[in-house]
Amino acid sequence: MKTLSRFMKFIGGRDLFYGLTLLILIGVTIFIYTKVSFIFDPLITIASTILPPFILAFIAFYLLNPIVDLLERLHIYRIWGIVIIILALSGILTGLILLMAPAVESQVKDLVSRLPAYVQQLGEGIDSWLQQSFLAPYYQQGYAWLTSNLSNISSQVGNYIGGAVEGFQNVASTITSVVAVIITFPIILFFMLKDGGQFKRFFLNLLPPKYRNEVNKILQNMDVQVGSYIQGQIIVATCIGILLYIGYLIIGLDYAITLAIIAAITSVVPYLGPMIAITPAIIIAIVDSPIMLLKLGIVWAAVQFLEGNFISPNVMGKTMQVHPLSIILVLLVAGNLFGVVGVILGIPGYAILKVIVVFLFEKFKARYNYFYGDEYGGYKEK
C-alpha cells in the first residue's frame, strides 16, 4: 500500500474523502429541499410559533440565572428561588406598566397627532436656511429630490403606526400569538432555570466520550460570551434610558419618558442604536428652539460620556473582545438578512460563531505543529 504524503496526512488522509462525500450528500439534500420546500411549510410555521418564547426565555435565563444561583448558595432550594424570582419580576413589570402606561399612551398619541406638524415645521426651517446659505444655487435641485422622495414621510409614518395599531387590534392571529408567547414564556423560563444543567449533560451524553470534554469547553465559552453580552447590554440600555429620562426632565424636553424608552430599547443594538435613539429627540428639539437643541446636545454628550467611560467598561468589560468595525459589519449583514431580529441577535450569534472558529483554529495550529512544526517552526502559543 502506498504511503500517504505528509500533506495528505495533514489535510486528513483518507478521512478527507469521507468528509467530501458527506459535503456532497449535504449539498444534494439542500438542492432537493429547495425543490420540495413547500412540504416543510408546516414545520416552518411551527418553528416560527415556538421560537419567540424560546428566544425571550433564553435572554431572561442569562439575566436571572446568576440570581437563582446566588439564592441557591444562600441555602434556598433552587425551585423556590426560581418561583420567588419569577413572581417578583412579574410584580415589578406589572407595577411599572401600570405606572408608566397612562403617561406613555398619552405622549404617544400626542406625538403621533403632532408628528406631521413637526415634520412640516422642520422642513420649513431647513427650507429657509437653505435659501439664505451658500447652498442656495443647489436648492431647487435638492428641493425637487426631497419633494419626490420625502414629501409623504409624515403621512407614511402615520399610516405605518396606524396600520400597526389597527392590525394589532383587529387581527386575531396576532393577538393569539402574543398571548401564547406571554403564557408559554414563563413556563419555558422556569424549566430552563430549573433543568438547564441537566439539558447540557443530556446533550453531552449523546456525544461519543472522546469529544465530550472539547464540546463542553466550547459550550462553556459560548455561555460566558453570550451571557456576558446579554446581561451587559440589558444593564447598559437600562442605565442609558434612566439617565436620558432624568436629563430630558431637567431640560424640559417634551415626551421625555417616551423618548427615554425608545433610547433604552434601541441602545440594545451597539453603535447604531444610539444614532437611531437620538433622531426623534433631535426633531422635537429643533422644532422647539435652538436653545433646546443645545440643551439636548449637552444631555446626550453627558450620557454618552458616562456610558462610554464608566457604565460599559465596568458592566461589559472586555469579555466579548470584538472589534467595533466587526460589530458594525455584523449588524449590517445580519440586519439585511434577518431584519430587526438579525440586528438584535446578530452579535450573540457572532460570539457563538467566533468561539467555534477559534476552537477550530486552535485545532488547526496543533495539527500544523504536529506535521510541520519541526521543519518550518510551529505556531507560537499566546
Image (tube, helix red, strand yellow):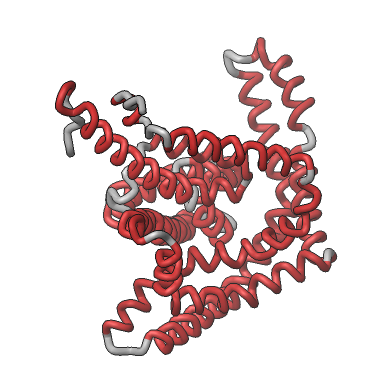
**What quarter of the picture does the N terminus occupy?**
top left
**What quarter of the picture does the C terminus occupy?**
top left
Q: Is residue 25 visible?
A: yes
Q: Residue at x 55, y 40 (%)?
A: 22
Q: Is residue 276 left or right of residue 348?
A: right
Q: Residue at x 17, y 33 (%)?
A: 380
Q: Position of residue 219 (x, y in %)?
A: 38, 58
Q: Residue at x 35, y 41 (%)?
A: 360
Q: Is 267 or 338 nearer to us in this picture?
A: 338
Q: Is residue 250 visible?
A: no
Q: Position of residue 254 (x, y in %)?
A: 58, 55
Q: Residue at x 60, y 78 (%)?
A: 98
When the figure is inspected, residue 101 is found, relative to residue 248, above or below; the finding is below
Q: Is residue 190 left or right of residue 69?
A: right
Residue 298 figure quarter = top left
When the figure is inspected, residue 186 is found, relative to residue 54, above or below; the finding is below
Q: Is residue 56 left or right of residue 203?
A: right
Residue 376 figure quarter = top left
Q: Is 186 or 128 nearer to us in this picture?
A: 186
